[in-house]
Amino acid sequence: MPYDDPDPSDPMTLHGVGVETAGDEAIYEMAACFIEEYVRLGFDADRILRLFHTRGYAGPALALHRLGEERIRELIVEAFALRGARDRRRSAAVASADVSLSVLDPAD
């Protein structure tokens, strides 16, 4: 495949999607989706809330602005009640970023 002529069937090509932002219901669903993903990744509640306060994350920052911090906190509590916190017995830090990845113990 030529560099300047991407194949539309290539799953690795970048695709933008429009997000409905006119109503609070769409923003609520977007925020709930972000939170669920972060919970599944093993982030704690404080770290998730910090992501919503980071302007570099446009979607979460918009949700915080539109819904307010109290509603975001409620969504975080609901997500942890539904999913529970991940067991993080061991983790490996990635040196280049503030990310922690779960490490599976082969003995388990």
Image (cartoon, rainbow, N blue to C red):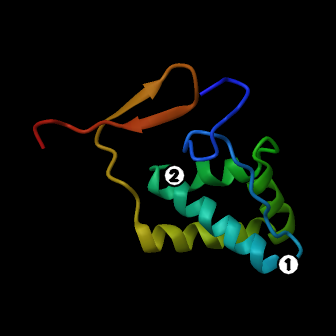
Q: Where does residue 15 sit, x and y in percent of width and height?
A: 70, 48
Looking at the image, which residue sits at the far left? 107
Mark 2, residue position: 44
Q: Earlier in the sequence, mark 2 or mark 1?
A: 1
Whole-number angstrom distance, CA of label 2 to CA of label 1 = 28 Å
Q: Identify which residue is drawn at 77% across, 44% down.
A: 54
Mark 1, residue position: 23
* Rendered view: 98 above or below 14: above
Q: Where does residue 104 sit, x and y in percent of width and height?
A: 25, 39
Q: Identify which residue is drawn at 57% across, 47% down.
A: 9
Q: Identify which residue is drawn at 50% across, 57% down.
A: 39
Q: Callout 1: few (<14), some (14-19), or many (20+) C-alpha neighbours within 10 Å?
A: few
Q: Which quarter of the rendering shows the C terminus?
A: top left
**Circle 2 sits in a helix, a strand or a loop, which is it?**
loop
Q: Callout 2: few (<14), some (14-19), or many (20+) C-alpha neighbours within 10 Å?
A: some
Q: Which quarter of the rendering shows the N terminus?
A: top right
